[in-house]
Amino acid sequence: MGLRRLAVAAAVLAVCAAAVEGFDILQILGKHDEFSQFCKLLNETHLAGDINRDRTITVLAVANGDMGHLTSAHYSLGTIRHILELHVVADYYDEKKLKQLSHGATAASTLFQRSGFAPGMAGYVNITQHRGGKVTFIVDDAADSVKPVTFVKQIESHRYDYSVLQVSSVLSSPEAEAPVAPPAPVNLTELLSKKYCKSFAGLLAADAKAFDTINGTKDTALTLFCPVDAAVAAFMPKFKNLTAKAKTAILLYHAVPDYYSMQFLKSNKGKVTTLASTSVAKKDYTYEAQTEADTVTLDTTVTTSTIQATVRDDDPLAIYAVSKFLQPKELFKPKKAEDLAPSPAPEVPKKKTKKKPGSTSAAAAPSDDDSADGPAADDSADDAADKAGAAPSMLTRWGTAAAMVAAALALGA
């Protein structure tokens, strides 16, 4: 009976662990040197992030020797992205499913179709099973001269969730290969000053290092959480007391080197890595993002801020106005545990008793030092704050996993 219970618990934990680890296409392909060029382009076009955020998806990877003209300098990154989007099927297909197609053929939508740039059926891929087990892929409405690509092997899959397959060459489509105009330049200071974040734009403009770092990231992938003007005004007394290095760090703390759409923020939760994380040595500079009642909150363990408005949400740049200045635990005191715990229930009044002669009233317990939050005195205080504030980003999911294991053990008893 004990072995049975252990087996049930192990199975439940395995499922939960898979959910916690998530899906990372670059990590999967990174295990195989033959897909290094395909992996590199997924990263450079930022398509990898979209793939990782999706579910029920199939990636048709191409080996280095079969990449052909896609690796040349002929196409812009925008066009390469559209071509690669043809290789991301918005459905689940593993080797078994490919070889058991109903009626031997099907048409599947791709991310190119979902991008809105594919006219008609140009974003669909026809999958056909042939005699002998051969399976081919070809873009719908492709020219007669275009040859289908062939399924080679299965690389990795997680049933009904994601699948990574190898195909013999790059899928071709005139619509996907059409030139893509470069995006119009974005003036970050002007954009922030127009909506909600004029004061924060001024702080960035006054810090050349922070501005250059953030501005240099906006054309590749950037999510910026800008405090509204009232939040900046409330925080200025503390900001003025920071060192120049700390000021730069806290400004970079509001910037994330990845594009997070509002839809993604509302449907995902976990630790957010900031530009300060990579710019300040031996410091964490992360915070937790989560959604409560359709409101996105950012918890730094010092402050909890909410997204109040969207300034811009257009891949690769997202800017959101937030209610409070984000204060990292590396520079300020984290909230005390007793402040985070729910208030205790009121005590039931006890029956009064007469005091014995000579007794004195009990002295009130000394209160803790509730000094106002401020910059940490030295690096040792920073390190202590790191340890105090550090918590696994998937703690909630592991709590759920523990509950599931407990239930499973009860059933197996």
Image: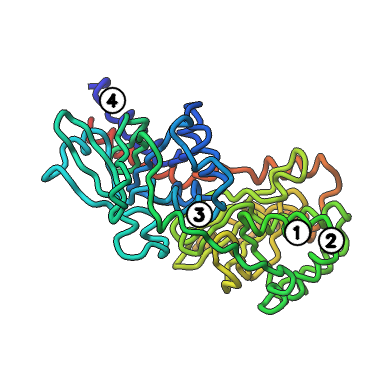
Dot 1 or dot 4: first in sequence order is: 4
Res 341 seen here: no
Where in the figure is residue 184, as x and y percent of width and height?
63, 68
Residues packed near mark 2 inside 10 Å, few (<14), some (14 to 19) or many (20 plus): some
Residue type marked 3: Thr
Mark 2 vs mark 1: which is more N-terminal?
2
Residue named by callout 3: 79
The secondary structure type at the circle numbered 4 is helix
Judging by the rendered image, the residue that carries numbered circle 2 is: 207
Q: What SS does tag 1 mark?
A: helix
* Colour basis: rainbow
Query: Which residue reaches farthest front?
Result: 145
Disc count in the image?
Answer: 4
Task: Identify the disc placed on residue 251.
Answer: 1
- Which amino acid, mark 2? Asp
**Residue at 32% across / 46% down in the picture?**
146
Q: Is residue 277 visible?
A: yes
| Residue that numbered label 4 is attached to | 7
Q: Are marks 2 and 1 in contact (CB under 8 Å)?
A: yes
